[in-house]
Image: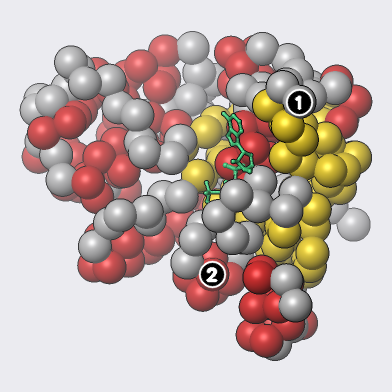
Amino acid sequence: MIEPILVLRGLKAGYGDFQALFGIDLDLREGEVLALIGANGAGKSTLIRSIMGLVPSQREMIRFRGEAIGGMRPDRIAGRGIALVPEGRRLFRSLTVEENLMIGGERGRPGVWTLDTVYSLFPALQERCHELGTALSGGQQQMVAIGRALMANPEVILFDEISLGLAPVVIKDIYAALPAIIRTGVSAILVEQDVGRALSAAHRFVCLQEGRISLAGEPRSFTRADITAAYFGA
Ligand code: ATP
C-alpha cells in the first residue's frame, strides 16, 4: 500500500472559543486528488488552513511525511513542501504577473515548476506577463495564483475554492490543467462548492458536515443521493 503523504488524526481546530472541526481523521495518498466537499460553514477552509498552519492545531494532529507539523509556522510548513492556493486568489496588487509568480518560487524548492513550465501550462499568462496581476480576468488571476503555488515545487497543493465566481468556460480550462499538475508528482486537496465537478476530478472525497466527516470514499462507491444526504444532513 502507498504510504499516505499527509495524515490528520483527531484534528480539532477553531477560532477562540468557537470550535469548527471536531476530530478529523484523513489521509492524503501520494499522487492523488482528494476532494473536500461540504456546505457553507462545514469547516473546509478551516481544515486546509490548519494544514497550512494558518489556524492553530496541536503538533501530533497533522503529520507530513511522518513529521508532526500541526501548528507549525506557515512559512516552515511551506518550506516542507505544502502550498496553498487561497480562496479569493490574493495576488500582490502592485506586482506584475511574472513578479507574482517569482515570489512563489523565492523560498521554494527546486523542481520541474519554473516560469517556463507554468507558462506552458497556462499560455495566456505568458502573453500578459508584464501586466499587473490584478488587471487580468478572474480566471487568469486564478491561473496566476495556481502558478505561484506551483513555483514553490510543493509535494502537496491545497486548492481552496478555485472555481468560485468564475465563468464555466474558464473553470473548464483550470480543471483541464489539474491532470498535468498531478502527473508531476504533486498530491492535492481540492475544496470545491461544485460537488459534481469536485467528484469528477478526484480519486477520493471527504464530505464535511458541521465540522465532522459525514462520508468519505471513492466517488463511484456512492450514489448521488448518498452524497447529497451527507452534504446537507438527512
Ligand atoms: P465556506 O464554503 O463558507 O467557506 P467552509 O466549509 O470553508 O465554508 P469554514 O470557513 O471553515 O467553512 O468555517 C467553519 C466555521 O468556522 C463556520 O461556522 C464559520 O463561521 C467559522 N469561521 C470561519 N472563519 C472564522 C473566523 N476567522 N473567526 C470565527 N469563526 C470563523
Q: Is residue 72 left or right of residue 96?
A: right
Q: Quadrant of residue 22?
A: top right
Q: Secondary structure at mark 2?
A: helix
Quarter in which the N terminus is drawn:
bottom right
Query: Depth check: 164 or 121 in front?
Result: 164
Labels in figure, total: 2
Q: Which residue is mark 1?
A: 17
**Label 2 belongs to which residue?**
195
Image location (x, y in percent) of residue 52: 63, 27
| Screen quadrant of the C terminus | bottom right
| Residue 91 to residue 21: above or below | above
Say which residue appears at 66% left-offset and 69% top-offset: 231
Residue 160 lies left or right of residue 132; in this view the side is right
What residue is shown at x 18% (from left), y 15% (from top)? Answer: 94
Q: Position of residue 115 (x, y in %)?
A: 30, 29
Q: Position of residue 53 (x, y in %)?
A: 66, 22
Nearer to us in this view, 39 or 81? 39
Among the two numbered marks 1 and 2 on one chain, the one whose residue lies closer to the N terminus? 1
Q: CA distance from mark 1 to mark 2?
A: 30 Å
Nearer to me, 33 or 84: 84
The amino acid type of the residue labelled 1 equals Asp
Residue at disc 1, secondary structure: loop
In the rendered image, the residue lying farthest to the front is 17
The nearer-to-camera label among 1 and 2 is 1
Left/right of residue 131 with respect to residue 18 in the rendered view: left
Residue 33: tell me if it is visible.
no
**Image quadrant, ligand 1:** top right
Q: Kindly identify the residue that appears in the image at 24 percent across and 50 percent down.
A: 139
Quarter of the figure with residue 163? bottom left
Q: Nearer the viewer, residue 189 or 185?
A: 189
